[in-house]
Amino acid sequence: VRLIQSMLKRFGLNHESKEQELEEEINAHIAIELNQRLEAGSNQREAELETRRAFGNISLVKEVTREMWGGATLERLAKDLKFGFRVLARNKIFTIVAVLSLALGIGANTAIFSLVDGLWFRPMAVPKSDQIVRIFSTTAQEREGLFSFPDYLDLTKQTSAFNGVVACGRRGVRMPRHDGTLQLLTVNVVSTNFFSVLGVRAAFGRLFTPSDEAAMWQQPVVVLGYRFWKRNFGGNPNVIGTQIELKRDKGSLFTIIGILRKDFREIDTAEDRDVWFPPQSWIRLAGQGDFQDRGFRWFDVLGRLAPNRTVRSARAQVQTIASRLATDWPAADAGRGATVISDLNYRLGQAGTNGLLLMAIVLLVVLVCSVNVANLLLARSAVRGKEIAIRLAVGADRLRLVRQLMTENFVLGMAGLAAGLLIGLGIIAMLPSLVIQPPGFEPLLQFQFDERVFVFSLGVSIVTIFLFGLAPSLRSSHVDLVPALKDETSLSMGSPQRGLRLRHWLVIAQVSISTTLLIATGVLVHSYLNTRLEDIGIGRHNLLLAYISWSGDQGPVLYRQAIQRIRDLPGVQEVGFATRAPLSLSGEGMVQRVYFPERLNLRNEAPIEIDYNSISSNFLTVMGTALLRGRQFTEVDQAKGAPVALINARMAQVFWPGEDPINKSFRLGGPSGPEYHIVGVVQNTPINSIGEAPKPYLYLPYWRNFTQEFTMMVRTKQDPLSLHDMVRHTLISIDPRLDPLIITTENQLIRYSAARYQITAELVSALGILGLILTAVGLYGVISYGVVQRRREIGLRMALGADRPEILTLVFKEVIILGGIGMLLGLPMSIAGTHLASALLYDVSPWDISTFIGSTCLLSAVLLLAGFIPARRATRIEPMLALRT
Amino acid sequence: MLRYRLMAKKDRYRNRIELLQGTLDMLILRTLQWGPQHGHGIGQAIRVNSEDALQIEHGSLYPALHRLERQGWLKSTWKTSEANRRAKYYSLTAAGKKQLAVEHSKWKELVSTIARLMRTA
């Protein structure tokens, strides 16, 4: 105990006794002095006065002396904290509103940061991730293209700018379940040096390295992703060394050698892969072509910069190598270049407008919250003016007072942070349900609350409190003592007090930010609704989709059988089919090389690659795509006769501008390939994603352009998903290998494709409403405060005969002035904001007038309501009471 | 009015501390050369020895005393004073004695420098 005491003394913490000592020391001094004066013959009263005068300001002496103790800051802090808590506990309403305000702002902020971080900003979980760069193949049209394996190998051999270059290609495989059905897995095929160069480690077992290559030719191996392992093997480490059967066109057994650590999921922030293959293993499933075809570009290439190398110098070298490759391999690489960008820049590019917009909006909301708190603090400093005046009058140090007030703000801030983090955690838990997952796949995204998110939120709250707490604190410490002590409040309307004017400006700022938020919300919601409600030419009906990929020569027979059986199921109206459904997740890739030998102006052009789909005769009817001219396919077209095709409006416009394309023709595959005659033109529909610019598109008869892929489109009477199990079991009963890899609905695909509009719209509207509420609270506070301040004036006016409407007008004038200025200032901000966000808008102009009007009306209504409550209170003032007090 | 009086008073008090800082330290150390003394005694000694030329507000001694103690130049004990009352007695430490020598020589240098300046002016 003595040891602890002496330690405490050392750190200046044992102040209880030190305080007493000082008290005693000063008392002794005064006693001695008094004694001397009495002995010198003064009377008691005179002696006491003189003693005190000679000593000076006792409390100030004590305070300055305490400062000399050093380490006293700690003790003073503890005292201030204690006092801060007491003050906050006393003003419950103030505290609750302020803490809630902060908490909402910080909570929203925490959640959005966690979302944006989880989607884009978080760096790859590898050591020294700042050295990681992305290497892209480029063409005139494409800035971030992929590499083929031969090009990657040549690049690796010729470059010296990196401590290793790795390749990573995304594919899919099927894994047989116990019941014989198939499960779709996501796969990364990576160069053997991938893990060692990046510094990825195994949770269990080991990862392959270049030195394993020889052995891997003999025994194919794979590495499992952590979440896949948890999900499918229950996190059992004994799976290492066992074999797993995976299938593509053919199947093979692979030995599991390791499990990745939980934190490394993929090279892209929001991705997660099930199985990791070295090339030696992938060849067993896909053959040599995936690695030998110089034109087959499917690898992301990453490098770890060598020390003393910059992105710029690496880029110069990579560009030189790319131009050499273009000369050496003109058939595949003519016109290709390459570039290097840092991984951070790449991720920021991915975040794009969407991520930055979300961050900007959330910061605006934080601003509204902070302004609210600043306003509350100002109001309170006005209320506490008297207390502070008294403390200053008895000799309190001004700096000390500011420090004390800031400590109170700090307590407030930390309470806000704590509550905010709770709110944030709640929202983070809800986030995955907000993010729309691709149908048929395991959920990818996990949002976490970790130290990155915490540090960000802490930073925001400290900056908030400091920025918005300091001004009111400084102001408080400059109270005009005389009027404050005399309890005078100004009687005039345009109060000369600076505090009031600042408060007004703060509310105006809030209103203008709110205007911006609401208009942004309105435009984004409008845009999102367009993606849902507008006729995009697909999915107007209840459509269940079943995607099957058959390997073998019986495909057509089984598919025809399946169509027949499904058509007979109860609840099914019609069955259409195509290679792929519009917006299906297989991504781009199906293209035909189109030649126009009969057209003079296009005869000598390079072949034009045009996306296409092979469709059933009833595809347009089932999908809900409108035929603009000509006719649909018939069953005859599907079987024999001259080859025919349908084109979309965009293709007609590009290749036959101002002409009727019906009966015009083109050739596929080569200048002397089969000649196709156009029999119809259909409306433009989205192909790969909602919101894409219309591209030329071809439709060919399914059976004459058969591929192994088959997507059945079942039009149902009721909710299509209610037929999910029945359709699946019917297909399996024909042949277990017909088990669809994905069963979903066209509307789910649309929803997934429009996800970015939906998420942004949902989040931004939540934030917009939050901002609106906070602004209403802010305005309410200022107007109420104004009414309290002007009680006497209002009482006087009423006593002199003003009636209630007059008083209402008096108060509302303020509301209208504040709201009006705020909205006027908010309009240019909104216009700038909606223009910045225009990349995210679907069929909505940034000038969307209806949104502008709607948002301002809503805001005005809410503000008038917020002003109405205090205004009504003003009319209830009893003149006599108000004047007397 | 009240406000201005208060302000003026505080500032006057501040200036005095600042002016005397350093010099006051030396005077305290010098006074304690003759033996332990309590705060009141130190103040009185300074006033008497300066023949009342230096009027120090009594209170302003205490911050200085506590600072010097913290710096290790003074140490303190509680003893019973002449008036039969417990008082805190300060005395010089070895470091304090050295510090006094240092401050004294610095002071002499300052005085001679200023004297020279005044002569040439």
Image (spheres, grey):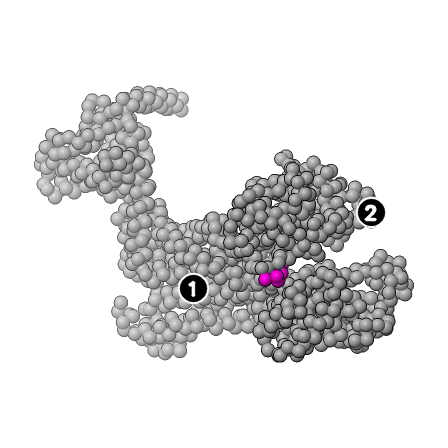
- Is there CB contact under 8 Å for labels 2 and 1? no
Kindly indicate the quadrant of the structure image that contains residue A806. bottom left
- The residue labelled by disc 1 is A778
Residue shown at 53%/63% (left/top)?
Answer: A434
Kindly identify the amino acid type of the residue bearing the numbered disc 2.
Pro
Give yes or no for residue A183 being in the magenta stretch: yes
Give yes or no for residue A42 being in the magenta stretch: no
Residue A15 percent across, percent down from the top left: 25, 40
Residue A267 percent across, percent down from the top left: 61, 49
Question: Label 1: how many residues lie within 10 Å, few (<14), some (14-19) or many (20+)?
Answer: many
> Which one is closest to the eye, mark 2 or mark 1?
2
Q: Horizontal placement of A760 versus A219: left or right?
A: left
Structural distance between the alpha carbons of marks 2 and 1 = 67 Å
Residue shown at 13%/40% (left/top)?
Answer: A47
Q: Horizontal placement of A123 versus A636: left or right?
A: left
Kindly indicate the quadrant of the structure image that contains residue A159. top right
- The residue labelled by disc 2 is A330
Residue bounds of the magenta highlight:
A179-184
| Residue A149 can be seen, yes or no | yes
Kindly identify the amino acid type of the residue bearing the numbered disc 1.
Gly
Q: Horizontal placement of A349 versus A26: left or right?
A: right
Q: Secondary structure at mark 1?
A: helix
Q: Is residue A872 above or below residue A671?
A: below
Q: Quadrant of the C terminus of chain A?
A: bottom left
